[in-house]
Structure formats: structure tokens, C-alpha cells
Image: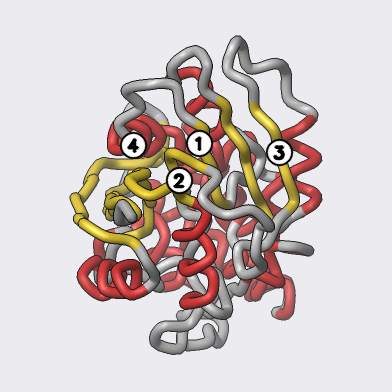
Amino acid sequence: MVANVAAAEWSGERGEAWRDSMGPLEAMLAPVNMPLIEALDLDAPYRIADIGCGGGETSIALARNAYPGSAVEGFDISPALIDAAKAKEAYGQVPIHFNVADAEQPLGDTALFDRLTSRFGIMFFPNQETAFSNLANWLKPGGRFAFAVWGPAPDNPWMSSIRDVLKDHIVIPTPEPGAPGPFRYADADEFGSLLQSSGFSDVKSQSWKEQLSLGGGLAADAAADFALSAFSIGQLLNQSDQLTAQAARLDLASLFSEHVTDGDVRMDAHVHIVTGTRAAI
């Protein structure tokens, strides 16, 4: 999690880094899946699009909770992550298709989907107005969307605490307001206004506040190693000397040790689950 991680980075190194840490990352974020899926109201067979699907775990969760006769399509800008998603085992009676795609580019046909969702896959568009206008056109009139985005950084110490520790050892770039990054839509009202102006309607937001288990169940030392390797902000330590990197890691492990419950590091998280529709024509 570093300042201004944009979509182009996800198509290359960031996507590959996520793939390499996919198991613990997906285990950590899995608790968000069901609140997001429930917000979609999957009350009939639907064609469902999962935007920024990554390695496919949310798409698989959608397929497992969708009505028979539904179909799920996962889209991601990273070829590495789409390849990883395609390599996973069969998903049961609801089919899934995975596609490399950039939401800033027209899909071709419009109004294809009954439901549109994304779990943390929409905060990195360089041209957000274009991307969300395109996504609105993917949704059938009257269709429903549900997006999960991170709330304010102070409400997400599992993420922001890493920056707080590292800034005592290295220079951390200050994120530009509104630039691509994990906290871009921390203000749910501003995000709702963007969605309204992009062609969505009846936009609402609810908060999900729980604890996340770093790496899906890691002790403090292992959680520090995971955070520094899986999150892009940790890569800034690669530019420092070995002593600095070791000191930063020790401080991070020490911080995490204060948040151990039943053997693993658990810290607060705040997610906005934003829902709405495309207006019926």
C-alpha cells in the first residue's frame, strides 16, 4: 500500500506480487466477501460481473452463492492474476469465465450484466470518470451494483500502521489527494457523488467494521514478513540498507505483537459497501 498505486502497475509488477502472496491475502480479505455478496441481492439467476477480480476468490464465492442458471465473469487488468484464476479448480454448477480487461476501455457490447461488483478493485483507475461511466454501461437498466472500498486510513490500522512504522526509518511519499490508491474513496459521500455523475443511481453506503487477521492467521513475526513482502509500501525498504530494513521489520513485528489474539495478529478494518442501481430507461 504505497502512494498512488495506479492501474498500470497492477497490470505488471503489482499484479504479480499479489499473485505471489495470493493465499494469505485472500484468507485475510475473505470476511468481506459475504457482506458484499449479500448487498447484491442475488435473488434470481443473474449474469454477474466481478471487476478487479484478482485471483478469482470473490468470483468463486459469487458462484457458490448465486442461483442455478447464473453466470459469473471475472475481469482484471493483470494477466498474471487472470492466469492464476483460470488455474483454480471447477466452481460447481454456476460457470465462471475470467477475462483480462481494463475498465477504462469499452467492453464492446453494453448493458450486459444484471449485477456488478468489486472487492477493492476499483480504487486505482487513472481516469476514474471514464472507468465508472464504462462500468455503468456494463449494467442493465435496473441492474444492481455493490462495491467494497476502504474507509479512512485511521480506521484501518492494519494498513496504516505499516506506514506509521516505516516512516520512522525511511522517507514515505505523501499520497496526493484523490490520486489512485487504497484510500481514494475513504469519503463515502464523495464516492457516491462520483458514481451518481457516472450513470449510477440510488447510491447508498453502509459501513462494515470488523477485525482482519493479517495473512489469514499469522503470528507477529510472520505477519511483519507478510506485510513487507505483500504490500507495495514494504518494497520501499528494498532501497534502504540492510540494517535499516532489519530495524523496520523488528519495529513492525513489535507493533503487531500488541494485537495478537489466539495466536494471530488481528487489527481493525473499516470498509464502505456502496450499493445502487443503473436507472431504468
Distance in Å between CA atoms under marks 1 and 4? 10 Å
> Relative to 108, is 170 on the left or the right?
left
Distance in Å between CA atoms under marks 4 and 3? 20 Å
* Image quadrant in which you'd find residue 20: top right
Res 236 visible: yes
Tell me, yes or no, whether the two marked residues, 1 and 4, touch with CB atoms within 8 Å: yes
Q: Amino acid at mark 3?
A: Phe
Distance in Å between CA atoms under marks 2 and 3? 15 Å
Residue shown at 79% from the left, 29% from the top: 87
**N-term-proximal mark, 4 vs 3:** 4
Q: How many marks?
A: 4
**N-term-proximal mark, 1 vs 2:** 1
Look at the picture and state if 5 lies above or below 65: below
User: Where does label 1 land, which residue?
Assistant: 48
**Are there few (<14), some (14-19), or many (20+) residues within 10 Å of tag 4?**
many
Give the percent coordinates (x, y) of residue 184: 40, 73
**N-term-proximal mark, 2 vs 3:** 3
User: In the rendering, which numbered label is found on residue 40?
Assistant: 4
Distance in Å between CA atoms under marks 4 and 2? 8 Å
User: Where does label 3 land, which residue?
Assistant: 98
**N-term-proximal mark, 1 vs 3:** 1
